[in-house]
Amino acid sequence: MKLAKHTGNRWHYQLTTQEAEHLRLIVGCFPVGPRHAAKISNTDTDPKTLEREKLLNESLAEHRKELQRKAAALVAPNRFKAQKTNQVYQVTSEDRETLLQILNDIRIESWRILGEPEELEIDPHKIPPDQLRYHQLMYVSGYFEQQLLENAEG
């Protein structure tokens, strides 16, 4: 994945056919895990605190639904244009930021599902088969995040 052109609010990335397919698959997995309820306080049992927590969690659930809708739109077929042996992926600056957020969420949720390992260089042969998917999601989403950020810096 490399930046092909950036003008104004438009970003055009050149991806191999395999990269384009991986991006579609990864973003299509969002959200990766179950939503975790946010806690404002572990000790405060004031009814107002509990009501704020409820409102916060409702807001977070709505935000997650919106991100899921945006994720589908970000990898829609019209975003990719075939060009010889590659694909050109087109996004606006706002869409690019949303894509970075989604990829980061996928990476972090996968890491949490894997038990939040301190050591990230895990031998794939030592990962239980039911968790291998999350190991792959964590690495591939990290790859795309890195490419988007490095390309932004020139």
Image: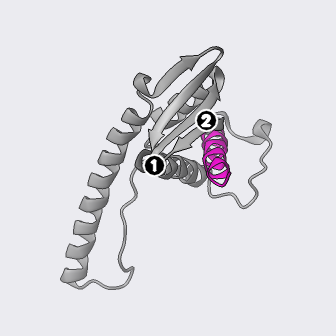
**Residue type at tag 1:** Ser
Does 101 appear above or below 39?
A: above
Residue 145 on the magenta span: yes
Image x and y of residue 12, in percent: 54, 36
Q: Secondary structure at mark 1?
A: helix
Classify residue 50 as left or right of residue 29: left
Q: Which residue is mark 1?
A: 93
According to the picture, the residue beneath numbered tag 2 turns out to be: 133
- Can you say which quadrant of the picture contains the N terminus? top right
Callout in the foreground (2, 1) = 1
The quadrant holding residue 42 is bottom left
Q: Secondary structure at mark 2?
A: helix
| Placement of 2 over or under 105, stated as above or below | above
Q: Main secondary structure of the magenta part?
A: helix
Residue 25 visible: no
The residue at the point 43 percent across, 22 percent down is 77
The x and y percentages for residue 39 are: 36, 72
Number of marks drawn:
2
Q: Earlier in the sequence, mark 2 or mark 1?
A: 1
Q: Nearer the viewer, residue 72 or 130?
A: 72
Q: CA distance from mark 2 to mark 1?
A: 30 Å
Work out whether residue 14 can be spotted: yes
In this rendering, the answer to whether 103 lies above or below 74 is below
Residue 17 in percent (x, y) is at: 62, 20
Farthest top residue in view: 84
The amino acid marked with disc number 2 is Arg
Please report the residue visible at 40 percent of the width from the left and 58 percent of the height from the top.
Answer: 36
Q: Is residue 48 magenta?
A: no
Numbered range of the magenta stretch? 134-154
Image mark for residue 33: none
At horizontal 51% and vertical 29% (from top left) the residue drawn is 24
